[in-house]
Image (cartoon, rainbow, N blue to C red):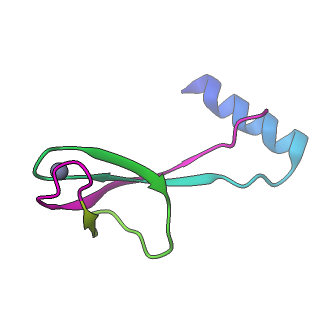
């Protein structure tokens, strides 16, 4: 984790403001299938989401929301 914070400091210095990409992880309580999708406004952890695309039995629940630094291409 030490090296990660060094990296973020360096990128802030070199490129000024950088937008983070925010993702939402949904998990189905029935089959445990996880979905990663771009964050949408109004998302929060434990919010019931759409029907599970894997088993179609249950609704996915938002498990985690996290931000990723965009990769340099
Ligand atoms: Zn499922």
Q: Residue furthest top?
A: 3
**Is 52 or 41 nearer to us in this picture?**
52
Left/right of residue 16 with respect to residue 70 in the rendered view: right
Indicate whether 13 appears above or below 53: above
Left/right of residue 18 with respect to residue 58 in the rendered view: right
Q: Quadrant of residue 50?
A: bottom left
Quick check: is 55 in the magenta stretch? Answer: yes
Indicate whether 47 appears above or below 65: below
Residue drawn at x 71%, y 30% is 7
Residue drawn at x 69%, y 43% is 70
Quick check: is 71 in the magenta stretch? Answer: yes
Indicate whether 2 appears above or below 56: above
Residue 40 drawn at (x, y percent): 49, 68
Residue 8 drawn at (x, y percent): 71, 37
Quadrant including the N terminus:
top right
Left/right of residue 18 with respect to residue 51 in the rendered view: right
Residue drawn at x 50%, y 74% is 41
Quadrant including the C terminus:
top right
Residue 29 drawn at (x, y percent): 13, 53
Residue drawn at x 77%, y 34% is 72
Left/right of residue 62 with respect to residue 22 in the rendered view: left
Residue 61 drawn at (x, y percent): 24, 61
The magenta stretch spans which residues?
Answer: 52-73
């Amino acid at each position: 984790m030490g090296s990660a914070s060094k990296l973020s400091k360096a990128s802030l210095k070199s490129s000024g403001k950088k937008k983070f990409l925010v993702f939402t992880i949904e998990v189905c309580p029935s089959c445990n299938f996880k979905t990663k999708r771009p964050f949408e406004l109004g998302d929060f952890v434990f919010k019931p989401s759409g029907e599970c695309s894997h088993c179609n039995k249950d609704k996915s629940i938002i498990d985690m929301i996290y931000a990723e630094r965009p990769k340099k291409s």
